[in-house]
Amino acid sequence: MPVHRRRAGAGPDQHSLSGRGAGDQRRGDGAAHPDPAQPPSLIHRPWKVQSVVRSMLMAEQPTSSPKPPRGGGPTSIRLSRPLVIVGGIIGALLLIALGFLFVRSLLPSPTEPGPGESPLETPPTSPLPPTPVAPPLVEVGESEVPLAVPTLLEVGGRSIPVRPSLPQAEDPWAVEAGQSDTAVWLYGTVVNYVLGLPPTDENRETVRGIQKGDPLVLRLSDGSRITFRALLPDEVPVGSEEVFEQTQPRLTLILLDPTAWTVLRADFEAVVEPTPATGERMAEVGQTVQVGDARVVVLEGHAERGGAGLAPGTMLYFVEVLVRNTGDAALTPSTFLMVLEDGKGNRYTPSPSAAGAGKHGPLPESIGPGREVKGSVAYVVPEDLAGPNLIWTFSPTPASEVRTRFSIPYAPPANPAPLPEVTILEAFLGENGTILHVVAEIHNPGDEILTVTADDIALSSSAGPGRLQTPSPPFPWVIAGGKTRQVELQFDRPEASTAVVTILGYTFEISGMP
């Protein structure tokens, strides 16, 4: 006799069992959901994060299926004399999705930042021009995370602006007229940063004047400073592929002479990440702050568990903001510096593809002069995100020191209570066919006590609601966390051949009654 079971909101179970008294092989039923394959964008060291540009991470992990919501169609149970029911459930197993990381987007030429102010003072502005379009992105699970890019090279007593190359350009090393004092970063090289210098007399003198052990400092768009120690320069043929290797963190500076390249390599030494000054006052939620040409307000911050495509142990955190453009030129939100820092100092960059799940959705591609917009900035963070306060750093011009910091109180979101699991063990007619007996097993997978009352039980048929005569044991049924209890329900036999019994939102159809 076939037995089908369906938890509310799920599709019908495709498994069937037969034989009186056979129990379900597993409690509960639900649709499978994919596990993502990548961790949150947790920044400890720039090259550790950025090295994933060349990596493809593959993993397979089984996951148990959550219970679907209540309210769907019932399980079908075919009964005969004696009436027998067996509950069957689909087991859920899903291979984890491939998460692969790759660089995308192109960076055009920069524009000059305007002056700005922090809540307390106007910080000094960087001589660097800002980058007006989105930095490279990597995909982490189903979320996109921007990478920090080089903006300034300090070498031989000089501060040389850095701009990205265009990977599809005929000559990726080309510089515009009047920019011979600009270094070109080969787009996508983020483990071994490869930079090219035009072959001017000043650049030749700079490269040849470097001694072994001299420091080279590379500033990134997120405010980080990476220090490298120089090795001795050498010459290689033009276009030599060895200079592009991404096997270890270092800096490779190339003097782009047309006959032979002079290559200066420098090994990684240390990284300094921007942190608030000791005792620095930060803006609060709801406070309006002018930063350059942007007037920004943090409306709220909130965490959301269970987002689609998230890796196990991660969740989404949203900073809901209001931004007004007070300048004369359009602002490009994709270039904004927006870094979230937790109570342990771990930092996270935005995940643009997840912003749509926020209260206001993503910021627009452009904010025109005088325009005011609301938007959600999303971050993929661990579920054990450290509080009690988070720091949100904002600047409309990442290459500039014009920025402000907001302090956002944080309390972890409550974990949703797991749904109870119900299995029908047996159903039969007794007392000369006048009483319908239903024997069930209820499992409480949570930590809190589960209490079941008469309101959680129902029987219905085409003849109308059924009457519960006797529960065994009597109500309420109190089931401790992690415990299972077997119960019996006795109903007046319905005046129909088919009836539906509901227990804690699980529905079971009993058919074949004479």
Image (cartoon, rainbow, N blue to C red):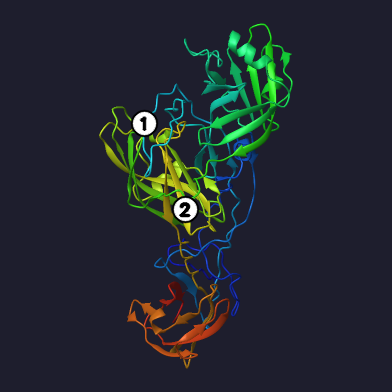
**Regarding mark 1 in the picture, which secondary structure is present there?**
loop
Q: In the displayed structure, would residue 93 be above or below residue 460?
A: above
The residue at 55%/16% (across/down) is: 172
The residue at 43%/65% (across/down) is: 69
Q: Which residue is mark 1?
A: 115
Q: In the displayed structure, would residue 201 be above or below residue 213?
A: above
Relative to 382, 407 lies left or right: left
Instruction: Identify which residue, 332 or 159, lies in the foreground.
Output: 159
Relative to 260, 427 lies left or right: left
Q: In the displayed structure, would residue 220 be above or below residue 280?
A: above
Label of residue 57 in the image: none
Q: Quadrant of residue 291?
A: top left
Q: Position of residue 242 (x, y in %)?
A: 71, 21
Quarter holding the N terminus is: bottom right
Q: Position of residue 492 (x, y in %)?
A: 40, 88
The residue at 67%/16% (across/down) is: 209
Please name the amino acid that badge 2 sits on: Leu
Give the crowd class for mark 2: few <14, some 14-19, many >=20 residues within 10 Å. Answer: many
Q: Quadrant of residue 371?
A: top left
Q: Which residue is mark 2?
A: 390
